[in-house]
Amino acid sequence: EGIETDTGTGKGVFVGSVNLGTTLSGSTYSLKDATRGGQYTTNMANGTSGNGTLYSKSTDTWGNGLASNGESAAVDAHYGASATWDFYKNTFNRSGIRNDGVGAFSRVHYDTNYTNAFWDDTCFCMTYGDGSGNTHPLTEIDVSGHEMSHGVTAATAGLNYSGESGGLNEATSDIMGTMVEFYANLPADNPDYLIGELIDLNGNGTPLRYMDQPSKDGNSADSWSSGVGNLDVHYSSGVANHFFYLLSEGSGAKTVNGVNYNSPTVNNIAVTGIGRDKAAQIWYRALTTYFTSTTDYAAARTATLSAASDLYGANGAEYNAVATAWAGVNVGS
Ligand code: ASN
Ligand code: ZN
Ligand code: CA
């Protein structure tokens, strides 16, 4: 019996109706994508150990958009992995998380009432819980991009997950997760500079994090101060998330894709954005060329300036915008 690469269709909880990379083996279709390093998606069926069971069936139509249909979260996860693969390949010519052509697999329905998602370098896999009440899975696309970007950071800079380097590690995941969301540009998930705006982890409709003004979450830092490295890494990340927003879009009030932002700066420093695509190139080059396990905010400033100089010229508009955006979050020379 033959094995062939196919294109299935699915309807996820958050991605809406999408095409999926699948495999037909004999008369059985599975969520396994040979075109992207063999990435596949498995069902943990509320378990917490092992690799789960590959999603397989006799038709190539998956999920119905409702969380009550267990395939719907699998559609989100499988599509999120494919969008993350395509984003890194087409934006940075990076072939997979380790740039070795090997795809990661994704596990859904991990545990019961599990309100998190995580990357694990050991299994080289992505895992999603079903959220509180097992009714709203954590499978939004910016979460997929966030978690898999932890794998990219581990394979490159290796930023230690504590102190200021930990904040930079988390921010790298928020930045690249957001870029994956913009790359996918799904009608069902309007791209924005908010993290996890659809999964409702807070239970009141608010996102987990806000890149334009991180303090809106009640915990994150908008700008650098000497104690910022003592915060949880998901809050010290605010400094770099804010830097990235400012570098992309500039300071003050702005509407992007119908979403209103307001990004204040230290001392009302005016920042003119260079666009998210150039900002992402600068961040990725800094991450993969200059950041190390112990990079702190001052070193991240130097690294991103070097990256901007490499990519767009010394003392060009992009270089100067990097300097101004860091000044706007109180990271100076
Ligand atoms: N979802 C969390 C994160 O990526 C998991 C963790 O604590 N690392 O930050
Ligand atoms: Zn993270
Ligand atoms: Ca988002």
Image: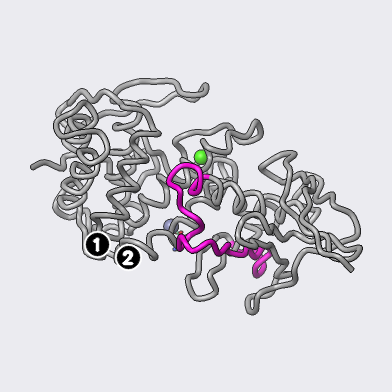
Residue 5 placement: quadrant: bottom right
Question: For the residue marked with disc 1, what is the amino acid?
Answer: Thr
Is residue 88 or residue 133 the one in the foreground? 88
**Spatial CA span between label 1 and label 2:** 6 Å
Q: Is residue 204 above or below residue 124?
A: above
Instruction: Tell me the SS state at disc 1.
Output: loop
Residue range corresponding to the magenta coloring: 87-114
The residue to which callout 1 is attached is: 292
- Residue 97 is a magenta residue: yes
Question: For the residue marked with disc 2, what is the amino acid?
Answer: Gly
Residue appearing at x 62%, y 55% in the figure: 36
- Residue 126 is a magenta residue: no
**Circle 1/circle 2 CB separation < 8 Å:** yes
The residue to which callout 2 is attached is: 158
Q: Is residue 206 visible?
A: no
Residue appearing at x 56%, y 67% in the figure: 125
